[in-house]
Image (cartoon, rainbow, N blue to C red):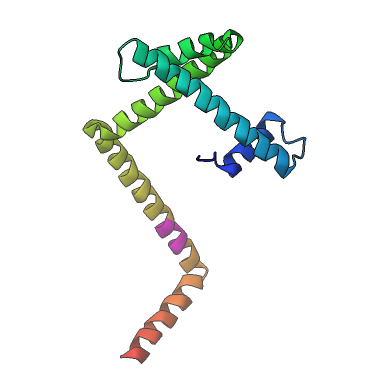
Amino acid sequence: MEQLPKATVQQFIKTSTNGDMKCSNEFVTQVMSMAREYIQVVSDQANTICLEQGKKTISGEFFYKAISKLKLDSQIPHLKEIEEEIKEEVNVKNQNRARFQDEEHLKQLEEQQKQLYEKAKLENSKNMIDDEEYGKSRKLNIQFEQDDEDQQ
């Protein structure tokens, strides 16, 4: 049977305890085992309900029915809150993905990038002029020019 990633479980535990508690490896292993068992029991129950109703795809509705059938109804409000948060995150990601696929938006981003490049180029040339007034850049340019002549 597959294990949950240990680093992920440890990070989850650390977040849940605000990083205030140290946890033994034995504790992390127990949490991993319990989480795996919970997932398996709920999935099996959802699969059974799904098959009983003649469906071939387990959906969220079957998940909540499985939770109820396992007499874990008290978890449903919290799980629905988490589901809403996940839906919002996915929606934002999809909107961002759609923005980058929108050709007009890509043209705007390209134009902004060109403007930033021109601004940086102007700033750089201004700094070069300021440096030349103090004789810094001129010496370096001469040195580079001499190096070029030496190489030929």
Instruction: Locate residue 1 relative to residue 9 in the image: left or right.
Output: left
Q: Nearer the viewer, residue 33 or 14?
A: 33
Position of residue 89 in the picture relative to residue 94 (left or right): right
Vertical order, 63 against 133 (above or below): above
Relative to the observer, which residue lies in front, 91 or 108? 91
Residue 120 in view, yes or no: yes
Considering every residue shown, the one lying at the far left of the view is: 103
Q: Is residue 130 magenta?
A: no
Q: Residue furthest right?
A: 21
Q: Is residue 128 magenta?
A: yes
Percent x, y of residue 56 = 30, 19
Which is more toward the observer, 109 or 9? 9
The residue located at (54%, 16%) in the rendering is 79
> What residue do we see at 30% from left, 29% from top?
98
Reply above or below: 115 against 124. Answer: above
Quarter assignment of residue 145: bottom left
Prevailing SS of the magenta stretch: helix
Q: Relative to residue 124, is residue 106 drawn left or right?
A: left
Question: What's drawn in magenta, residue-wise?
Answer: 124-129
In the image, residue 69 sits, relative to residue 131, either above or below, namely above
Residue 60 in sight in this render = no
- Whole-percent x and y of residue 143? 44, 82
Looking at this view, is 99 or 136 the one in front?
99
Q: Which image quarter is the C terminus in?
A: bottom left
- Please provide percent x and percent y for residue 21: 77, 36
The percent position of residue 139, horizontal first and vertical second, equals 47, 78
- The residue positioned 40% from the left and 86% from the top of the image is 147
Please count the marks in the image.
0
